[in-house]
Image: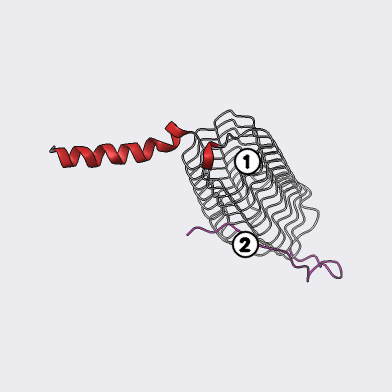
Amino acid sequence: MNNAQRWLALTALALFALPFLLGCGEGKKTPGPKADMKDADLSRCDLSGKDLQGADFSGANLYLANLRGANLRGANLRGARLMSADLEGADLTRAHLTNNRLRGANLRGANLKRANLTLANLTRANLMRANLRDANLQGARLMSADLEGADLTRANLTNAGRRRAYLTRANLTRANLTRANLTNAKLQGADLQGAKLWRTNLTSADMSGANLQGADLRGALGVNLEDTVGTPTHMPDDPLDDGESGAQADSVFLWSE
């Protein structure tokens, strides 16, 4: 390696390490509880385990940031860019993630209870064993996201869409899956007790071992109850109540790109 090549290599290394050496954020603002980090550049920052409760990260760049185990309860992350960020085990209870870019993010085991994920982009995100109880996922994009073992109890997945959703052993108790397109979905062993599946498309979905006790399947398409357990309260041929069949809602996209 000649001197020019060494200089280029050292320059590239310095540029990569700069965020870690100089601190995170423009002007070296220090992230903390209720901190104002709006529109800050926090890409590749190590914020693992930090208390960031109630902080404002709206519009911030958190690309490849390390937020493992961070406390983000009630944090404002509207419009933030968290592509490929590591949020494993982070606490995002009641966090505002509207229109957030979480493509390829690691949210394994994260607590997203009552989080607002409206219009969030979760394409190829890892949500295995995540807590999404009572979460709002209207309009969210979950293409090829892995939700195996996730808890989606009472989550709003109204008009959820498309195919190859990975929901193996997911807890969808009383979840709202109205008008969902779950064609080819993986629902083996999923808990769908009391779930609302009005006009849900389950064509070629693998529901072996799924629990449909008390589920409402009115208007559902392609339903195959073979190898499922439990008794639904309503079957696909049962009529919807007046005014229900025309209900509209935002979309949650779950197809594979």
Question: Is residue 246 part of the magenta span, yes or no?
Answer: yes
For label 2, the SS is loop
Q: Main secondary structure of the magenta part?
A: loop
Q: Quadrant of residue 18?
A: top left
| Residue where numbered disc 2 is placed | 181
Residue 2 painted magenta: no
Q: Amino acid at mark 1?
A: Ala
Residue farthest to the top? 49
Q: Name the secondary structure under disc 1.
A: loop
Q: Is residue 25 visible in the rendered structure shown here?
A: no
Q: Which residue is more in the foreground, 230 or 152?
A: 152
| Residue 173 x/y as whole percent | 73, 45
Q: Which residue is mark 1?
A: 150
**In this orientation, does residue 132 appear?**
yes
Instruction: Name the residue at 51% across, 37% down.
Output: 24
The mark that comes first in sequence, 1 or 2, is 1
Three-letter amino acid code at disc 2? Asn
- For the N terminus, the quadrant is top left
> Which residue, as the protein is rendered here, is positioned at the far front?
27
Vertical side of 56 occupied by 203: above or below: below
Residue at image location 45% in from the left, 34% down from the top: 22
Against 99, is 87 above or below?
A: above
Which corner quadrant of the image does residue 111 belong to? Answer: top right
Residue 220 place in picture, x, y as percent: 70, 63
Q: Residue at x 87, y 70 (%)?
A: 242
Q: What is the magenta range?
A: 236-257
| 73 with respect to 10 (left or right) | right
